[in-house]
Image (cartoon, rainbow, N blue to C red):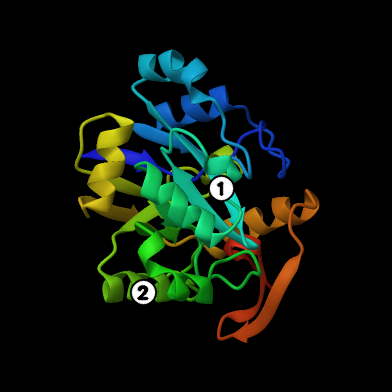
């Protein structure tokens, strides 16, 4: 089984301000025993070929990918040879999938943010190969549960991702994939359901730490707020939580 992360950002990201380089991400993943890693910048697919040898020397397979905004919603497009950056609508996505193989993952699908798929995932289930269990959850607040119910209803696999914006996020939730260490084989295995998710809930201190760098960096604006049993929770894009 391969330890895999499919949702990461680096300083090459054209949208988010990320302090670590792709090299630093590879080094961190190697130190944590990962076997494969997808770099999924917002709106732009990084050329991972130039880093493939460096990653391979450290036991890491790089999977090309992009976190594309499609009709206002974030979607992970993985291992498409070309055209992923040109997808703007769900019709475009359908055409891309009809032309070439690749893996389409719904990230943080039902988190309370305007960029999360929500009802659009319900409208277009055939376009998605897997849904993400995002590492941003605690014992009392977990927006992944609806995604897991969706996956069970449509017979789709679940993958575990950390949506890495800081290196210390990596490792709390991940996928174990039954495949050879090759991008095509990994994506095919996930689509076929040969994947398990390992993960642990974040402590509130950890969740607050993620929220703090998001806010201080000015990356995300608050999207929703509600009262929970554990206290007032502020919810930001991608499930960033703060307990007060």
Circle 1: element type = strand
Image quarter of residue 182: top left
Considering the image in quadrants, where does the C terminus appear? bottom right
Considering the image in quadrants, where does the N terminus appear? top left
Image quarter of residue 70: bottom right
Q: Residues within 10 Å of mark 1 (few under 14, many from 20)?
A: many
Left or right position of 164 against 54 = right
**In this figure, which residue is indicated by the disc labeled 2?**
150
Q: Residues within 10 Å of mark 2 (few under 14, many from 20)?
A: many
Q: Is residue 154 visible?
A: yes
Left or right position of 65 against 213 = left
Left or right position of 234 against 4 = right
Q: Position of residue 171 (x, y in %)?
A: 43, 44
Q: Residue at x 66, y 37 (%)?
A: 13
Viewer-proximal residue among 62 and 44:
44
Q: Position of residue 87 (x, y in %)?
A: 57, 49
Distance in Å between CA atoms under marks 1 and 2: 21 Å
Q: Residue at x 25, y 36 (%)?
A: 185
Viewer-proximal residue among 179 and 84:
84
Image quarter of residue 3: top left
Residues at marks 1 and 2 touching, judged by CB atoms closer than 8 Å: no
**In this figure, which residue is indicated by the disc labeled 1?**
67
1 or 2: tag closer to the N-terminus:
1
Q: Is residue 162 visible?
A: no
Q: Position of residue 146 (x, y in %)?
A: 42, 76
Figure label count: 2
Circle 2: element type = helix
Viewer-proximal residue among 69 and 200:
69
| Circle on res. 163 | none
Q: Residue at x 64, y 85 (%)?
A: 227
Q: Residue at x 25, y 68 (%)?
A: 155
Q: Position of residue 179 (x, y in %)?
A: 20, 38
């Amino acid at each position: 089984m391969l330890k895999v992360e499919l949702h990461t950002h680096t300083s090459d990201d054209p949208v988010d301000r990320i302090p670590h380089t792709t090299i630093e991400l590879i080094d961190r993943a190697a130190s944590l025993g990962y076997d494969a890693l997808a770099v999924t910048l917002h709106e732009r697919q990084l050329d991972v070929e130039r880093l493939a040898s460096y990653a391979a020397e450290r036991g890491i397979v790089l999977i090309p990918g992009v976190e594309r905004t499609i009709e206002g919603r974030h979607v992970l497009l993985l291992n498409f040879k070309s055209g992923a950056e040109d997808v703007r609508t769900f019709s475009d996505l359908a055409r891309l999938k009809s032309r070439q193989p690749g893996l389409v993952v719904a990230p943080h699908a039902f988190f309370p943010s305007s960029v999360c798929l929500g009802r659009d995932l319900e409208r277009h289930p055939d376009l998605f190969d897997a849904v993400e269990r995002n590492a941003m959850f605690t014992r009392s607040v977990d927006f992944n549960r609806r995604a897991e119910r969706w996956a069970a209803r449509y017979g789709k696999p679940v993958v575990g991702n950390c949506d890495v914006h800081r290196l210390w996020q990596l490792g709390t939730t991940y996928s174990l994939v039954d495949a050879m260490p090759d991008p095509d084989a990994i994506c095919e295995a996930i689509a076929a359901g040969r994947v398990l998710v390992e993960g642990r809930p974040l402590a509130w201190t950890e969740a607050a730490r993620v929220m703090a760098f998001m806010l201080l960096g000015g990356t995300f604006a608050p999207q929703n707020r509600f009262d929970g049993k554990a206290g007032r929770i502020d919810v930001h894009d991608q499930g960033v939580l703060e307990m007060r």
